[in-house]
């Protein structure tokens, strides 16, 4: 059997970051920037008011107070998006809204709350310093500054600066398109009444959601029966529209496992046993003329998820061009005892306790136990050479609470 680390290295060596594309800014969210972005203009691009109030010459109101207000004639009204039609003259003020350009001759803004809010004339009830409540041009970004570096993951905050510097399109590494296919004649769609011997397809929903959480655009292909022609058609239908194919089921030694038979004719796919629990039977390779990567996962849902976390999730993040491929790894005390099969690396479902310790969850660590998987927010990693963990032992933990 191959160990987990060597198999992971093979998987990561079989994929590469996706080629950059120019996409509309509206499609760039959660993509990785592929080139530096510089500001073509300063931010702000002009001096503007940070408050609703009155643009003034600060020297004229230096002695203003509530007991001795200064009266000024209001000669213009400037909303955001417009310029003043008048320049400030001695003894005057210009009513101004937040974001509006500062009028010529004004060096400060008096907030409306510190006036009587007059329309034709205004009483200034307080003095302000020069530059008060004025956003100066280029105080945030100077024209030519690099505002975002290649390799940055574009989140909501990054979208704002890209829009502010006028990026209608952005060069990014796109989100990988992943086709998810479950196989097995026993599978039926959720909502279908179950006959004896049938089970609801949960794997494809699990894997599509996991792909989305990893930053891919995944779509689900309905369950495929154990029939070579049906499976081949399903694979061939996806080759032209995805960057990665993900299957679950059909990779063990069963007599009706069609995945191996079909993929051997469509490309170069290696199937092997990995020294891990759960998730021993695995496969990966390339199919089709364009050598689309394919990763085949075991059919038991917990095995499928643990395999996804170890092999598929880092592959998706590599395809996105992200530098960090793994979830946070930490050390914590195990609150209960745990056994592990010899010569295999176990990934035991667990939950973080308020104390910071972790405890195994569910009715057991079997590869079919979905209740414990749903409850878990951590994986306890038990090394190959360890067969038991005692309560209170320190263990390595994969933190599932964070990306």
Image: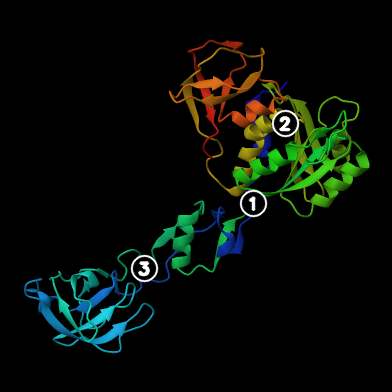
Distance (Cα) linking label 1 and label 2: 29 Å
Left or right: 333 as drawn, with respect to 76: right
* Residue under the image location 79 percent in, 30 percent down: 271
Q: Earlier in the sequence, mark 3 or mark 1?
A: 1
According to the picture, the residue beneath numbered tag 3 turns out to be: 43
Distance (Cα) linking label 3 and label 1: 32 Å
- Percent across and percent down for residue 379 are 57, 26
According to the picture, the residue beneath numbered tag 2 turns out to be: 301
Residue 140 vertical position relative to residue 184 in the rendered view, above or below:
below
Distance (Cα) linking label 3 and label 2: 51 Å
Q: How many marks?
A: 3
- Percent across and percent down for residue 385 are 60, 13
* Residue under the image location 66 percent in, 27 percent down: 371
Q: Earlier in the sequence, mark 1 or mark 2?
A: 1
Mark 3: few, some, or many residues within 10 Å (few <14, many ≥20)? many
Nearer to us in this view, 391 or 316: 391
Q: Quadrant of the N terminus?
A: top right
Q: How is the image coloured?
A: rainbow
Q: Could you say which quadrant of the image residue 23 lies in?
A: bottom right
- Percent across and percent down for residue 59 are 11, 77
Q: Could you say which quadrant of the image residue 21 lies in?
A: bottom right
Q: Earlier in the sequence, mark 3 or mark 2?
A: 3
Residue 270 vertical position relative to residue 157 in the rendered view, above or below:
above
State the SS at label 2: helix
Mark 1: few, some, or many residues within 10 Å (few <14, many ≥20)? some
State the SS at label 3: loop
Nearer to us in this view, 240 or 81: 81
Q: What label sits on residue 18 in the rendered view?
A: 1
State the SS at label 1: loop
Left or right: 255 as drawn, with respect to 12: right
């Amino acid at each position: 059997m191959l160990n987990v680390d060597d198999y992971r290295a093979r998987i990561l060596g079989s994929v590469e970051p996706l080629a950059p594309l120019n996409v509309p800014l509206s499609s760039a969210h959660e993509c990785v920037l592929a080139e530096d972005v510089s500001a073509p203009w300063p931010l702000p691009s002009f001096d503007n008011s940070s408050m609703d109030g009155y643009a003034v010459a600060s020297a004229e109101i230096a002695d203003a107070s509530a007991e001795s207000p200064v009266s000024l004639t209001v000669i213009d009204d400037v909303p955001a998006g417009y310029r003043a039609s008048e320049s400030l003259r001695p003894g005057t003020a210009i009513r101004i809204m937040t974001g509006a350009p500062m009028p010529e001759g004004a060096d400060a803004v008096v907030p409306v709350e510190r006036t009587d809010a007059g329309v034709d004339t205004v009483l200034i009830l307080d003095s302000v310093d020069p530059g008060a409540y004025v956003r100066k041009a280029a105080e945030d970004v100077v024209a030519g500054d690099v505002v975002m570096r290649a390799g940055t993951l574009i989140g909501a905050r990054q979208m704002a600066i890209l829009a502010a510097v006028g990026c209608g399109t952005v060069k990014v590494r796109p989100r990988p398109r992943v086709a998810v296919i479950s196989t097995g004649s026993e599978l039926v769609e959720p909502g279908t009444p179950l006959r004896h011997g049938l089970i609801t397809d949960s794997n494809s929903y699990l894997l599509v959601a996991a792909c989305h959480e990893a930053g891919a655009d995944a779509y689900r292909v309905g369950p495929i029966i154990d029939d070579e022609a049906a499976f081949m058609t399903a694979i061939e239908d996806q080759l032209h529209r995805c960057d990665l194919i993900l299957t679950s089921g059909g990779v063990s030694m069963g007599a009706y496992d069609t995945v191996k038979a079909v993929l051997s004719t469509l490309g170069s796919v290696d199937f092997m046993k990995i020294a891990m629990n759960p998730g021993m039977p695995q496969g990966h390779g390339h199919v089709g003329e364009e050598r689309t990567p394919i990763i085949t996962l075991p059919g038991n849902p917990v095995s499928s998820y643990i395999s996804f976390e170890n092999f598929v999730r880092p592959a998706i993040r590599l395809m996105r061009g992200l530098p960090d491929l793994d979830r946070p790894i930490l050390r914590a005390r195990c609150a209960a005892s745990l056994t592990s099969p010899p010569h295999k690396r176990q990934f035991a479902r667990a939950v973080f306790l308020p104390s910071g310790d972790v405890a195994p969850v569910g009715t057991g660590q079997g590869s079919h136990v979905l209740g414990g998987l749903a409850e878990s927010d951590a994986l306890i990693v038990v090394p190959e050479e360890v067969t038991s963990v005692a309560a209170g032992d320190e263990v390595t933990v994969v933190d599932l609470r964070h990306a």
